[in-house]
Image (cartoon, grey):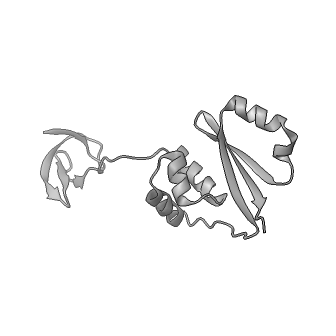
Amino acid sequence: MATVKCPKCAAIGAVRNGVINQRQRFRCKTCQYNFTVDKVGKSISTYYVIKALQLYIEGVSFREIERLLGISHVSVMNWVKKYQIKAPENNTYHPTYKILNHKELIDFYSDRKNIEGAGMIVTELGDKFMIIKWERFKE
């Protein structure tokens, strides 16, 4: 007897009742309801999902997001499709980014030439910060 909670009557204690699609099936001893338990798998924190989508919207490529966050570029592509995210297209600007710790970020902002002539966003990336800067293509 397994200690599985019935989703219908919330009774604890169900018996195994076969396998369907490689998932264990159970039958509740109280209400006779048949059910399967959810597959337990690796899940990625919503923090990383949101961060990956933000980076994508800012113009960072799938492979660069993979290198930055350590999340598969295929997962990022799947999230973009799932949430129907559209990245704005702008051919005259391209994003460049830097990863800095807190002290380096302060030093970056204290130099006036770093913040002139381009759009910029700073986002938290774990214990570091990412600066994304949009610069015009040099022709």
Is residue 106 found left or right of 128 in the rendered image?
right
Q: Looking at the image, which residue is at 50% across and 58% down?
A: 76
Residue projecting furthest to the top = 103
Q: Looking at the image, which residue is at 48% across and 46% down?
A: 70
Can residue 131 be seen? yes
Q: Looking at the picture, how far across and down is residue 61, in whole percent?
A: 58, 60
Q: Looking at the picture, how far across and down is residue 14, in whole percent?
A: 18, 44
Q: Is residue 134 above or below residue 102?
A: below
Quadrant (top left, top right, bottom left, bottom right) of the N terminus: top left
Q: Looking at the image, which residue is at 81% across and 44% down?
A: 114
Q: Quadrant of residue 34?
A: bottom left
Q: Looking at the image, which residue is at 80% across and 37% down?
A: 109
Q: Is residue 24 above or below residue 106?
A: below
Residue projecting furthest to the front = 139
Quadrant (top left, top right, bottom left, bottom right) of the C terminus: bottom right
Q: Looking at the picture, how far across and down is residue 42, in whole percent?
A: 36, 46
Q: Quadrant of residue 21?
A: bottom left
Q: Quadrant of residue 127?
A: top right
Total marks in image = 0
Can residue 46 be seen? no
The one nearer the camera, 20 or 79, is 79
Q: Looking at the picture, how far across and down is residue 75, in whole percent?
A: 45, 57
